[in-house]
Image (cartoon, rainbow, N blue to C red):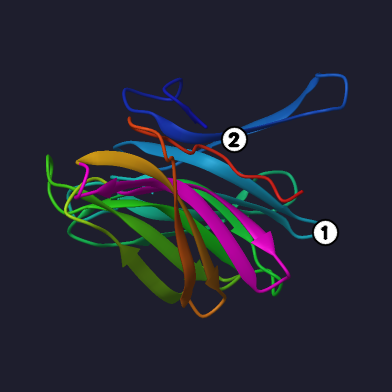
Amino acid sequence: GSSGSWGENAQAFMMKIDSTGNYLWSHAYGGDESEEAVSVIQRPGIGYYLAGMTNSVSQGNFDAMLIKTDEVGNQVWMKTYAHPAWDRINDAMMTKDTGIVMVGYRQATMGAASDILLMRLTKEGDTVWTKTIGTVGDDRANAIVSFQDSLYYVVGDMFVPDSNLVKGVLIKFNDQGVVLSQEMIGNAHGNYHLSDIENG
């Protein structure tokens, strides 16, 4: 997550505990401004990835961030993905080839409508592709799960102009970033919010 224990602004934070809840170690990551880690992914025998956001190394607003550590949490590298918009990451997962997919939303300017943000990265943190999906209203991706190795489902929220309401959305896409299907969730009147998804 994040913690302000190391200074005035919050830094990304990772803590390891054992199976009975005993503290083993913790580390903070970041710069002079604010960082937040929202998802941690273990690569067995190699270390951890922390996906999140930073405005310490950015174009003025929050940028997407990926941190790689060793097996005891020492930072190996931190990469940021500069964009003039405000990017926020809500979830991430490892791909079959040990790369990373991060999902969230991109807001063009403060107060502007947001678009769903999908990012595919290599295991070294280099960008393979970035995709945005949006309407005239606020659209956000909140969680991701893999399906059949190279296929992914994302859930989130999407604005429906015809009804002026927000509905849940289920998006299926492949490893190349091609959207294969998009389904709106929520038939009754009112707004819907999908926050998580699990592959059963």
Residue 133 visible to the viewer: yes
Vertical arrangement, residue 98 with respect to residue 37, above or below? below
Q: Position of residue 118 (x, y in %)?
A: 42, 62
Q: Does 177 sit left or right of 105 as displayed?
A: right
The extreme right residue here reads 20
- Taking the spot 17% from the left edge, 49% from the top edge, the residue there is 60
Quick one: 47 or 152, which is closer to the camera? 152
Gap in angstroms between the C-alphas marked 1 and 2: 19 Å
Residue carrying label 2: 27
Q: How dense is the environment of label 2, judged by Cα within 10 Å: few (below 14), some, or many (20 and up)?
A: some
Residue carrying label 1: 45
The span shown in magenta is 139-163
Quick one: 27 or 176, which is closer to the camera? 176
Q: Report the disc number at residue 102.
A: none
Please tell me which of labels 1 and 2 falls first in the chain: 2
Q: Secondary structure at mark 2?
A: strand
Looking at the rendered structure, the kind of residue marked 1 is Gly
Queried whether the magenta region covers residue 130, the answer comes back as no
Q: Position of residue 31 (x, y in %)?
A: 36, 42
Looking at the rendered structure, the kind of residue marked 2 is His
Q: Does 108 sit left or right of 21 as displayed?
A: left
Is label 1 or label 2 in front? 1
- Taking the spot 38% from the left edge, 54% from the top edge, the residue there is 64
Vertical arrangement, residue 189 with respect to residue 114, above or below? above
What is the chief secondary structure element of the magenta stretch?
strand
- Taking the spot 30% from the left edge, 49% from the top edge, the residue there is 139
Q: Position of residue 160 (x, y in %)?
A: 26, 48
Residue 31 visible to the viewer: no
Quick one: 24 or 172, which is closer to the camera? 172
Q: Secondary structure at mark 1?
A: loop
Q: Position of residue 159 (x, y in %)?
A: 27, 47
